[in-house]
Amino acid sequence: MEKNIFDVKARSPWTPLKGVNVISVSPSKRRIDGTITIPGSKSFTNRALIISALANGKSKVKGILKSDDSFWCLDSLKKLGVNIEIQGEAVFIEGNGGNWESGNLYIGAAGTIARFLPGALAVSGEGTWEIEASESMSKRPVSPLVDALRELGAEITYLSNEGYYPLLVQGKELTGARSAFRVIFLVSL
């Protein structure tokens, strides 16, 4: 059996795997009789959180999936100055229209955040952000997104390996309608 090595830094307080290094799954010896509720999608959760933060005014996002990815998304948004209140599986967000506070952000292994956040920061009128990702996310190429954002005028610098996280993003207004379609397509993947 292959041993999996987990990136412990990417685990959040919301992880259901706290202290777990190995998981075994085997058939039940008894009949299982019960009901389950299917949790929300981490991808949909993070998209809704970022869109709500970009909006002006208050939003309520219900049915969030509490996962490492959504924890790091909320953590990043709070560090960006977004007022957030969590009540059970609902999040109340007071969007600031993309007027972010500068700072350092950690996104763990959250692919949705890795694809949406650089663009959301780049279109901000001002600010500087260093975005660090988990070891596993830092092995996934982000250059197609960064290249498209740069075509629009974004100022994004690779801080380690070319084409991969960590990134330095400097906010400024972007231009270029043709490239905007590419950015929207890339972040939708």
Image (spheres, rainbow, N blue to C red):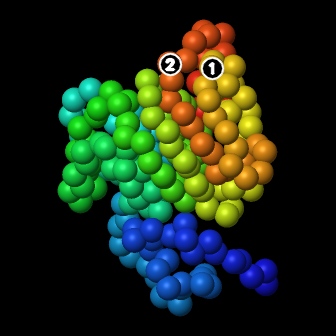
Q: Is residue 180 left or right of residue 82?
A: right
Q: Label 1 is placed on what type of residue? A: Gly
Q: Work out whether residue 86 or residue 143 is closer to the camera in this orientation and state it.
A: 143
Q: Label 2 is placed on what type of residue? A: Glu
Q: Residue at x 40, y 68 (%)?
A: 14
- Provide the residue designation for mark 2: 173
Q: Quadrant of residue 141?
A: top right
- The quarter in which the N terminus is drawn is bottom right
Q: How many marks?
A: 2
- The quarter in which the C terminus is drawn is top right
Mark 1 lies on a secondary structure that is loop
Q: Position of residue 77 (x, y in %)?
A: 38, 46
Mark 2 lies on a secondary structure that is loop
Q: Is residue 16 left or right of residue 164?
A: left
Q: Are marks 1 and 2 in contact (CB under 8 Å)?
A: yes
Q: Is residue 26 visible?
A: no
**Which of the numbered marks, if any, corresponds to residue 153?**
1
